[in-house]
Amino acid sequence: MRHNTSSENTSAQPVDKKLDNSSVPVSKRDRFSNLPDGERYLYQLFSMIEDGDLTVTNPEGRVFHFGLAGSKEPLRLIVHNPNTYNRILTFGALGFCEAYMDGWWDEENNNLVELLGLLYRSNVSKKAGNKITIALAFKVLTQRLRTLPILIQNSRKNVQHHYDLGNDFYQNFLDPTMTYSCGYRLRETDSIEQMQLQKYELICRKLALQPGESLIDIGCGWGGMLIYAAKNYGISGTGITLSVEQAKLAQEQIDLRGLGDKLGTACASRSH
């Protein structure tokens, strides 16, 4: 079914060796001009592929070739769902990956590593902005605004699924500050806790925090940054998280240090 294609095997860019000798040479603009915006945009990006051999079959069975035949192992991207293109146009690399997770496309021989390597070597993601027109940018913005409520809802579900596994789980491998991000190392002998505290100190200095100022920490985790800033710089503040478990432990840590009058946490629409 994947290769029951129409007779239009289109070479997406001039190559030394044509993948299909029956292809009629046409300009890149004419080649994609009759395609929907999202599909045309993706193929324009794939046209940047030089060191590789990629064939794309769209849901209608039309075949498009990109790169140089025989230069690398042939890769075949099969698009099953026509909404794949707009998803990639709207959400970029994230949309591309999530479309695969939902079964909207696949690589015929499961050569995902090779496919991603080809796109990475071709700098497809970095060059994507060069192909965005004003009309496309407006369409992307419109689609993102339309899906914003769903994105917010999904974000809440993702965070809760990840962080609400239980604080005990994270306490098993995080440092005492319960910081779930990279630290700042000054010496090779620094412990993880030292690196996290050094990161907090660097952030506070860059913010030039002064006593009495207020700080909002969006994505506060377990409150480590707020606690450090309140203790060492005399600020007040609020930590915001989508995780009930994080907010609960963060508030416990705040109260344990006698900072309840200065700091608080907020979980989604609920305040603590």
Image (tube, rainbow, N blue to C red):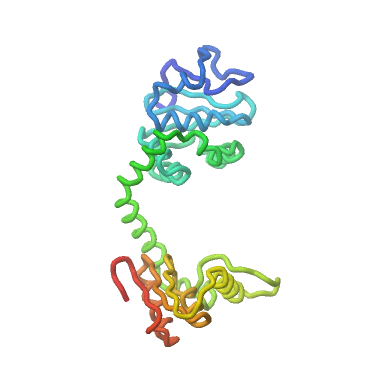
At a point 51% along the width and 15% down the height, the residue shown is 26
At a point 38% along the width and 37% down the height, the residue shown is 86
The image quarter in which residue 75 lies: top right
Residue 245 appears anywhere in the view: yes
**Image location of residue 113, percent across then percent down:** 56, 42
**Image location of residue 137, percent across then percent down:** 41, 38
The image quarter in which residue 254 lies: bottom left
The image quarter in which residue 139 lies: top left
At a point 44% along the width and 72% down the height, the residue shown is 215
Judged left or right of residue 112, residue 241 is left
Quadrant, the C terminus: bottom left
At a point 41% along the width and 63% down the height, the residue shown is 162
Quadrant, the N terminus: top left
Question: Between residues 121 and 265, which one lies in front from this camera angle?
Answer: 265
Question: Between residues 171 and 16, which one lies in front from this camera angle?
Answer: 16
Residue 115 appears anywhere in the view: no
Q: Is residue 130 above or below residue 233?
A: above
**Image location of residue 114, percent across then percent down:** 58, 39
